[in-house]
Image (cartoon, rainbow, N blue to C red):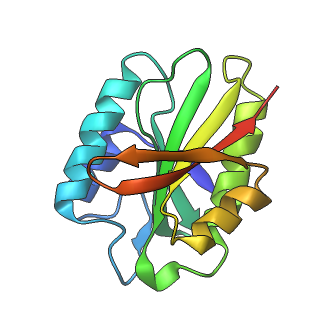
Amino acid sequence: MILATTEQDYAALIEGRAPRDLRFADTPIASSDILDILDDVAAEVRQTFSPASWLIVSDGELVGLCSVTRPPKDGVVDIGYGIAPSRQQRGHAGAAIRDIVRWAKATPAVRAITADTSPDNIASQRVLECAGFVRTGTRWDDEDGRLVTWRCETE
């Protein structure tokens, strides 16, 4: 299940508390440095678009996050996601991305969703393929190196 995040959710995560009435997985979703960055990105996105990100929840446990990585342009929403290491390979990412695709298809302002994966991250590539994404090519990122690009049309 996905839940749209709030500013309070990020404040709790940054303070090391589970937001709402959720429990934490036994491994962190992201470091505090990454959570700070995601909070800043969400605040920027939230100025013009909502939701800015989602909590990924399973049986009352916070297992991951999915974020809009920059303010959408021309109806294209770019996402990134992560699952707590101890909760990977259990279908959480796939379920969340399918939920986000359903949300996007029901949201007239969204024409497409894009995402990037590491060429070596086969599991994430399969998640996107199973959710209806198509590989569109590669690009270079100064921080992450070569990335595989993906797109899912929602119209």
Residue drawn at the location 43% of the way across and 16% of the way down: 48
Q: Is residue 103 left or right of residue 119?
A: right
Query: Does residue 9 show up?
Result: yes
How far from the left and from the top, in percent, is residue 133?
Answer: 73, 48
Q: Give the answer, above or below, for where 56 lies relative to 116.
A: below
If the image is split into quadrants, where does the C terminus sit?
top right
Q: Position of residue 40 (x, y in %)?
A: 24, 37
- Inspect this view and state whether residue 54 appears: no
Image: 140 above or below 96: above
Expressed as whole percent of the image width and height from the top left, the position of residue 2 reads 60, 52
**106 over 56 or under it: above or below:** above
Q: Quadrant of residue 152?
A: top right
Residue appearing at x 64%, y 57% in the figure: 96
Q: Residue at x 69, y 67 (%)?
A: 126
Q: Nearer the viewer, residue 22 or 135?
A: 135
Horizontally, residue 6 falls left or right of residue 40, namely right
For this rendering, which residue is in front, 109 or 143?
143
Outermost residue on the right side: it is: 155
At horizontal 37% and vertical 68% (from top left) the residue drawn is 29
x, y percentage for residue 31? Answer: 23, 66
Whether residue 140 sits left or right of residue 4 in the image: it is left
Q: What number of labels is visible? A: 0
| Near-viewer residue (129 or 57) | 129
Q: Is residue 75 above or below residue 119?
A: above
Q: Quadrant of the N terminus?
A: bottom right
